[in-house]
Amino acid sequence: MAPDARPLLSRYNALMTPRALAERKARMKKILAYLKKSYPKPKSELAYKTNFQFVAAVMLSAQCTDKAVNKVTALLWKKYKTPRDFAAADPAVFTNEISSIPFFRNKAKAIIGAATVVAEKHRGKVPRTEAELVALPGIGYKTAHVILGELFDVWDGIATDTHVKRFAKRFDLSDANDPTKISKDLEQLVPKSDWKYVNNGLVLYGRYVCPARPHDCASHPLTKRWPEAATRWPKAT
């Protein structure tokens, strides 16, 4: 567990009764059993060949589909491979190269900035700790733990993206709206040895089985485990 996780866990769950917490743990146990069986080997669908390419891809994927990111990086990765390649990029050129991605200006600045720090401070090696990753421009809790899991098989946190957030709300696993707070709630419900299955599993389930738009999902595997989810469609916040 990350050094700061335990205080946050107790703070976020301070108002939850023991019974409510036990019910959530039991519900999460059923969900987790399905995710472990259906998605046993966590693997991102973002395309990359080098570690920093993956870092950049994750940064590009914020509020954007992996499919759209992969379309852009198919050409981009031929030009940019190492942190030094990204750090040496002409900001105007790089910004234009990713202009089909949402928030491309901010993302271009963050990627070049992160690459510069990695090249200069970390000798071109992507950091292997949450603390070092979140110190980089454009990288927060979610991005850091996606990177750690994918590149180094380090699962010290549960990353909460849009898919994880909506399922956490639909299955009443968290009362929070902030992604990091949702992560901390989920981390209390799931044994640390199984944290690696949550983000990847819910992302793939949301992408290919149960999309975000309201629909009849009573027959979906996870809804069968908690039928009440069929009537819960939290608004995006």
Image (cartoon, grey):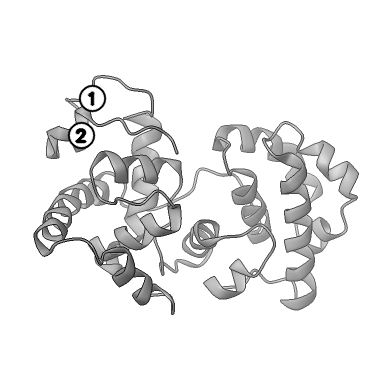
Position of 43 with respect to 202 (left or right) is right
Q: Residue at x 44, y 52 (%)?
A: 178
| Residue closest to the far bottom | 3
Residue 98 visible in the picture: yes
Is 54 in front, or is 18?
18
Instruction: Compute the Cα span from label 1 to label 2.
Output: 9 Å
Where is residue 164? Give x, y as percent. Answer: 38, 46
Query: In the picture provided, is 237 more to the left or to the right than 71?
Result: left
Q: Write down the residue under mark 2.
A: 229
Q: Looking at the picture, how far across and down is residue 156, in whole percent?
A: 41, 70
Residue 180: x and y in percent read 44, 58
Residue at the disc numbered 1: 217
**In this rendering, which labeled residue sits more in front, label 1 or label 2?**
2
N-terminal-most mark, 1 or 2: 1
**Secondary element at image label 1:** loop
Residue 75, image quadrant: top right
> Closest to the observer: 163 or 177?
177
Q: Is the Cβ of the residue at disc 1 closer than 8 Å to that at disc 2? A: yes
Figure check: 53 above or below 209: below
Q: Residue at x 32, y 30 (%)?
A: 209
> Does residue 4 sit above or below 32 in this rendering?
below
Residue 91's place in the image compared with 213, above or below, is: below
| Tag 2: amino acid | Ala
Residue 190 is at least partly visible in this image: no
Given the current orientation, which residue lies at the most extreme top position? 216
Q: Amino acid at mark 1?
A: Cys
Q: Position of residue 66 (x, y in %)?
A: 55, 38
Dividing the picture into quadrants, the one containing residue 115 is bottom right
Q: Residue at x 23, y 42 (%)?
A: 171
Provide the secondary structure element on which disc 2 rests.
helix
Q: Tag 2: Cα neighbours inside 10 Å, few (<14), some, or many (≥20)? A: some
Residue 80: which numbered mark, if any? none
